[in-house]
Amino acid sequence: MEQADRLVHGTAAGGTVRCMAAVTTRLVAEAAERHAVSPTVAAALGRTLTGTLLLGSSLKELDRLTVQIVCEGPLGGITVETNARGEVRGYVRHPEVAAGLNADGKLDVRAIVGEGMFYVTRESGYDIGLYTDPYRGSVPLVSGEIAEDFAYYLTKSEQIPSAVMLGVLMRASDEGETYVAAAGGLMIQIMPGADEKTVAAIEASVSRAPHTTALISEGASPTDILHAALGELEFEQLGERLVSFACPCSYERAVSLISSIDRAELESMLREDKGAVMNCHFCNETYRLDEAQLEGILSER
């Protein structure tokens, strides 16, 4: 039976190393299905969903973290949000784009991402109307393979040298359709005070570790992934939580947004479209209001 998606975070080497790992197979599969993405886009979106969850593993209640990749490749861009509850949602601009395999025989994510910028925004209190100045950081994309771009962002923008591994394994069903067979990743951050021996040991063990999706395919948990990456270095687990694809959009919110539209535009919708349609970019859910419902909104005005 496929294990539930989980994220584990902890510390090692006396708190001078932060480490986190996640299994995200189910939520990446849901995102891929909701957005009807190509296999290559599933890999790009899945890596970003997992990386954002790992980056946001220390979020506190009411915090929100957004990762946005704005790129020149045919994908166009990726936007992903996560919160302190381990919920994540995201979308791409062009879900249908595809590319062949790269020289290593893997999905060529770099080909559809190309050059661009990597942005991270940290906010707090937004959902309850407590507006504070958000923190924003940005760096150029260095590879378009996503994991390296997360690592580069942490090193250059937040001054935290990091190792990041992100993966999405796609397989073909008996009917010939591709599906997400495994997804997950890890993030190891070197904090001030870490000695050179510890850093060297981590670099060596990470380079020897099997790929995260290979481990997940064999049933590995997030804790198992960290053990494989850290080698003989012991770590203290500080927390574990379920993670999931979740979007707060709803029919009620859609009605509220449509109700806020200018009256003249509502009348135009009623006259020309006999109703209104609203689509959520993040989860691809569609909400429809028929002619009678739109007339009701106008009459309430």
Image (spheres, rainbow, N blue to C red):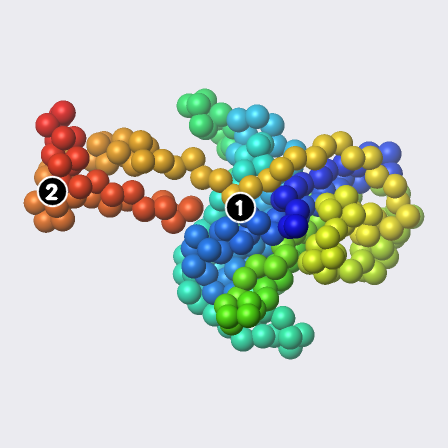
Q: Position of residue 274 (x, y in %)?
A: 12, 45
- Give the left or right position of residue 78, taking residue 228 as reference: left
Is 45 situated above or below 20? below
The reply to whether residue 139 is in sight is: no
Q: Position of residue 4 (x, y in %)?
A: 63, 44
The reply to whether residue 213 is in sight is: yes
Residue on which disc 1 sits: 67
Q: Give the SS element for disc 1.
A: strand
Is 17 situated above or below 103? above
Is 94 situated above or below 288? below
Q: Residue at x 55, y 52 (%)?
A: 28
Q: Residue at x 65, y 41 (%)?
A: 6
Using the numbered discs, state the Cα–Cα distance from disc 1 to disc 2 in whole angstroms.
37 Å
Q: Residue at x 29, y 42 (%)?
A: 287
Count of residue discs: 2
Residue on which disc 2 sits: 270
Q: Position of residue 82 (x, y in %)?
A: 54, 39
Q: Give the SS element for disc 2.
A: helix
Q: Nearer the viewer, residue 195 or 63?
A: 63
Quadrant where the C terminus is found in the figure: top left
Q: Residues within 10 Å of mark 2 (few under 14, many from 20)?
A: some
Tag on residue 288? none
- Give the left or right position of residue 66, taking residue 252 as reference: right
What amino acid is labelled 1 in the image?
Answer: Val
1 or 2: tag closer to the N-terminus: 1
Quadrant of the rendered structure where residue 86 is? top right
Q: Residue at x 43, y 52 (%)?
A: 34
What amino acid is labelled 2 in the image?
Answer: Leu
Q: Nearer the viewer, residue 52 or 32?
A: 32
Q: Position of residue 2 (x, y in %)?
A: 64, 50
Q: Nearer the viewer, residue 16 or 37?
A: 37
- Give the left or right position of residue 15, taking residue 240 as reference: right
